[in-house]
Image: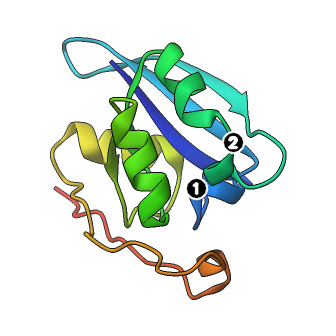
Amino acid sequence: MKIAVPTRDNQIDDHFGHCEYYTIFTISPEKQITGIETLPSPEGCGCKSNIASVLEEKGVTLMLAGNMGQGALQTLQAHGIEVVRGCSGSPAGITEAWLQGNVHDSGTSCDHHECHEAKPLTFKVAKP
């Protein structure tokens, strides 16, 4: 399994379509991180790029994201990528939290293209 996390300055980007790069985690069947790579974000808005097909080709089946518009969500889903919105913090931290079952989709999408300028969603990871 592979998980992609839109990243900027080593943190989850508030809006997937404007991230610097994607941090991609390879996950073992035992739910352990076994590999990490980065994929530069295409120039311009990610929601109008071919990033969904590129991520699909790399084997990504899950994206842990801050937020995104409905169109981007549908495009990723059409490429077999499940999306969990409402994430924040470090890519590795949120991935570990998801692997432990502590991360769930916020159910909230941007309703306008400039959503990334709005106040970001915050997500608190429960400590065991």
Q: Label 2's element?
A: loop
How far across and down, in percent of the image, does residue 99 sit? Answer: 24, 36
Q: Which mark is residue 49?
A: 2
Residue at the extreme bottom of the image, as rendered: 119
Q: Is residue 85 left or right of residue 43?
A: left
Question: Which residue is at 34% across, 41% downward?
Answer: 77
The reply to whether residue 65 is visible in this rendering is no
Instruction: Label 1, secondary structure: give it.
Output: helix
Quadrant into which the C terminus falls = bottom left
Residue at image point 41% right, 61% down? 87
User: Which label belongs to residue 42?
Assistant: none
Neighbour tally class for label 2: few under 14, some 14-19, many 20 plus, Cα within 10 Å: some
Looking at the rendered image, the disc whose residue lies closer to the viewer, 2 or 1, is 2
The amino acid type, in three-letter code, at marker 2 is: Ser
Please identify the residue farthest to the right as the structure is shown: 43
Q: Earlier in the sequence, mark 2 or mark 1?
A: 1
State the residue at coordinates (59%, 64%). 15
Count every numbered label the image shows and give the total: 2
**For mark 1, what is the residue?**
16
Along the viewing direction, whichever of 77 and 88 lies nearer the viewer: 77
Q: Position of residue 70 (x, y in %)?
A: 41, 64
Compared across the picture, whether 62 is left or right of 22 comes to: left
Vertical position of residue 42 compared to residue 46: above or below: above
Amino acid under disc 1: Phe
Q: Residue at x 29, y 47 (%)?
A: 97
The picture places residue 16, in percent across and down from the top left corner, at: 58, 55
How far apart are the two marked residues, 2 and 1, measured between alpha carbons? 12 Å
Give residue 38's quadrant in the image.
Answer: top right
Horizontal side of residue 40 vs 14, given as left or right: right
Q: Pick whichever, 110 or 13, lies toward us.
A: 110
Position of the N terminus, as image quadrant, is: top left
